[in-house]
Image (cartoon, rainbow, N blue to C red):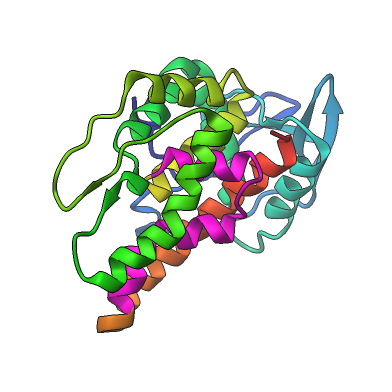
Amino acid sequence: MTVPPASSPHPPTDPQPSDAAIDPRPSIKAERRALPRKFYASATAAQEGDAFQLLLDGRRAKTPARRFLTVPNAVIAERLVAEWAAQEVFIDPSRMPLTTLACTAIDAVAQQPTEVAAEIVKYAGTDLLCYRADAPEGLIAAEVTVWDPILDWAARDLGAIFAVSSGLAHVTQAPAVTEQIAKAIGTRHALSLAALHVLTTLTGSAVLALAVDRRHLSIAQAWRAAHIDEDWQIAKWGVDADAATRRAKRQEEAAVAAFVLGAMGP
């Protein structure tokens, strides 16, 4: 299962009398199209039951699938409101990572949580931390220094003892490993599951994502751990400007996912 990409936001064309239909999800073609003009003056949030609803000029905002755009607590709602309040003349989806994540959680993840959790478990079967360089010695040492303690934590706190390989050799993890990772994911709110999925895919590691979720690593520590090989190459060959821009964007998305995990608790 792959969480679908999102499309560009646009003003509502057929809102209900009290609801604003919002499509805040970015598209790979978004930069080529004119951004939609901002159509509201105020963004606020109101508690409705056990969720917080985004309001634009007092009207309930909706996701692209026309479900209400809600988040589970006041901390996340405050940041969601800030994203919408920060829009100026136009609505720029590239500046709305939390909105994107929330809509994905509501429209996609909540509709198929079992499949999303299974995809995270699948990453654990080929986890980044288990595939080591076989040269040069400096890179090997760097991976051992950073990754081994994290795998030790996974064995101790998650009960998942990972096998490690070097070079191109494939390693098959014991069934108990994926079972323990599935247990660690557990049953959780769709937004938390979406955040965990995003962090897993961006780092290539379910272990790193769960280490952030369980407060064992900060997002900065996890991000550095996920990019040991890349940073080694940068130190040797220099920075590619385009690659650096793409990495910064991914890092922003990872930071938002980590924020959500932190705001929702372990």
Above-or-below relation of 88 to 132: below
Quadrant showing the C terminus: top right
- What residue is drawn where x is 59% and y is 45%? 212
- What residue is drawn where x is 38% and y is 66%? 142
Task: Look at the image and give the residue range highlighted in magenta.
Answer: 205-234
Image location (x, y in percent) of residue 2: 35, 30
- What residue is drawn where x is 36% and y is 60%? 143
Residue nearest the viewer, comparing 177 with 218: 177
Let me know if residue 84 is in the magenta part: no
Q: What is the chief secondary structure element of the magenta stretch?
A: helix
Indicate left or right for 75 with 102 as reference: right
Let me know if residue 218 is in the magenta part: yes
Quadrant showing the N terminus: top left
Q: Quadrant of residue 73?
A: top right
Residue nearest the viewer, comparing 259 with 169: 169
Q: Is residue 95 visible?
A: no
Q: Quadrant of residue 62?
A: top right
Image location (x, y in percent) of residue 248: 46, 66
- What residue is drawn where x is 52% and y is 45%? 9
Image location (x, y in percent) of residue 235: 33, 81
Image location (x, y in percent) of residue 164: 29, 43
Indicate left or right for 262 with 131 as reference: right
Q: Is residue 123 visible?
A: yes
